């Protein structure tokens, strides 16, 4: 799988389907790839970009270049509410009047994440302490996502989906696939006859999406994510249209690659624990990260690394490979009693 040479956008993927490319300034992801689908009486956009002028201008320019503009945009589908996908939703709504459609589980997080974050901030502080972050560092990590809120013009959806719906758009018939894990209400759009799928952040050609525990994402997100990968097993798809990086074709090879990555990650965490009780913070500091050492990360990245570590630890608790216990308000993960070194 090699990255294609840079192409001009909007890029026609097939008749009635265009790929856009919207920059994400000063971010290693580089860009988001929204899609534009021709309907019978207007166009549908899938995802948007950060709410910053550079992204808003690129989006508008490419809508115009496609001959669609805001005037002919009727619907905005949002794969999930991360700022790079949902950030410009309010702008799109205001300029086009488009109907916004989001999964129910994402809709439920909009208010607490983007509108009234005070409660979430307080919960986040307690949560970081519980997972072993030294008190002196809690405040930096706690508020680290606040600047990102500025990249979102939050707007409530006009309609929610649950997964399983069929969306009849022009010559296409899309099936909404609920694929929780990267975000609780992440959705993909499958076109069975044309054999392509819009995967959002669920499956990307080389990046493995962040799968994290978070005060707003409890339970077993890694288990959800792996189950969501399995949902795509066996699909007869020849083109994967992701929301970052580039178009690719080997969906099943990529699914196996991502599953293998998480298996290795689980083992690495067990190795770092060395048979002793550890907090998520300690494990996060001990494992290798593709993008550098934990201590070199920004506060926001450190928090994401702790959340990602926790998703793996909780997964192993549910699989009976670890147990957890609280001591003085701090949560530790440890091998099951019999295996304690
Ligand atoms: Zn995302
Ligand atoms: Zn993304």
Image (tube, grey):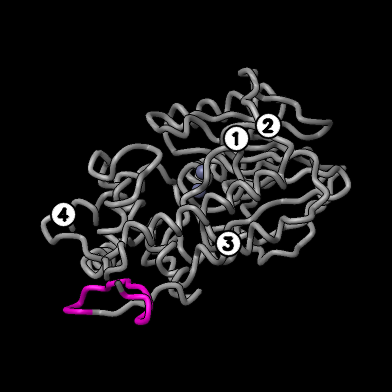
Label 2 SS = strand
Q: CA distance from mark 3 to mark 4?
A: 30 Å
Q: CA distance from mark 4 to mark 1?
A: 35 Å
Circle 3 crowding by C-alpha within 10 Å: few under 14, some 14–19, many from 20: many
Between residues 337 and 180, which one lies in front from this camera angle? 337
Circle 4 crowding by C-alpha within 10 Å: few under 14, some 14–19, many from 20: few
**Image quadrant in which the N terminus is located:** top right
What residue sits right under mark 1 in the picture? Answer: 33
Q: Earlier in the sequence, mark 4 or mark 1?
A: 1
What residue sits right under mark 4 in the picture? Answer: 137
Q: Horizontal and vertical percent for residue 18?
A: 72, 31
What residue sits right under mark 2 in the picture? Answer: 19
Mark 4 in CB contact with mark 1 (< 8 angstroms): no
Between residues 204 and 254, which one lies in front from this camera angle? 254
Q: Earlier in the sequence, mark 3 or mark 4?
A: 4
Residue 180, label in figure: 3
Q: Which residues are magenta?
A: 327-340
Q: CA distance from mark 2 to mark 3?
A: 24 Å
Query: Which residue lies most toward the left here?
Result: 136
Q: Earlier in the sequence, mark 2 or mark 3?
A: 2
Label 1 SS = loop
Query: Which residue lies most toward the front here?
Result: 341
């Amino acid at each position: 799988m090699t990255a294609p040479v840079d192409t001009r956008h909007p890029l026609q993927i097939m008749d009635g389907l265009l790929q856009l490319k919207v920059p994400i300034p000063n971010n290693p992801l580089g860009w988001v790839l929204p899609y534009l689908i021709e309907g019978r009486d207007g166009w549908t956009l899938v995802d948007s970009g950060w709410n910053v002028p550079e992204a808003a201008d690129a989006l508008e320019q490419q809508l115009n270049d496609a001959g669609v503009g805001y005037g002919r945009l009727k619907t905005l589908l949002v794969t999930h509410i991360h700022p790079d996908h949902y950030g410009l939703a309010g702008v799109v709504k205001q300029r086009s009047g488009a109907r916004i459609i989001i999964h129910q589980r994402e809709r439920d997080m909009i208010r607490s994440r983007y509108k009234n974050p005070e409660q979430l901030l307080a919960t986040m502080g307690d949560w970081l302490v519980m997972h072993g972050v030294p008190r002196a560092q809690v405040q930096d990590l706690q508020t680290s996502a606040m600047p990102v809120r500025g990249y979102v013009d939050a707007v409530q959806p006009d309609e929610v989906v649950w997964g399983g719906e069929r969306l009849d758009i022009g010559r296409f018939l899309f099936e909404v696939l609920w694929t929780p894990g990267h975000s609780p209400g992440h959705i993909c759009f499958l076109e069975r006859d044309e054999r392509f799928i819009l995967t959002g952040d669920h499956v990307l050609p080389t990046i493995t999406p962040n799968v994290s525990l978070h005060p707003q994402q409890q339970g077993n997100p890694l288990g959800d994510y792996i189950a969501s990968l399995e949902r795509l097993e066996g699909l007869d798809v020849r083109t994967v249209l992701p929301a970052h990086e580039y178009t690719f074709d080997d969906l099943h090879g990529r699914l196996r690659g991502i599953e293998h990555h998480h298996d290795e990650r689980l083992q690495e965490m067990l190795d770092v624990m060395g048979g002793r009780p550890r907090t998520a913070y300690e494990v996060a500091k001990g494992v290798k990260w593709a993008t550098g050492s934990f201590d070199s990360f920004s506060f926001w990245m450190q928090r994401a690394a702790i959340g990602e570590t926790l998703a793996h630890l909780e997964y192993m608790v549910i699989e009976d490979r670890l147990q957890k216990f609280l001591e003085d308000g701090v949560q530790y993960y440890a091998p099951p009693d019999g295996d304690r070194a």
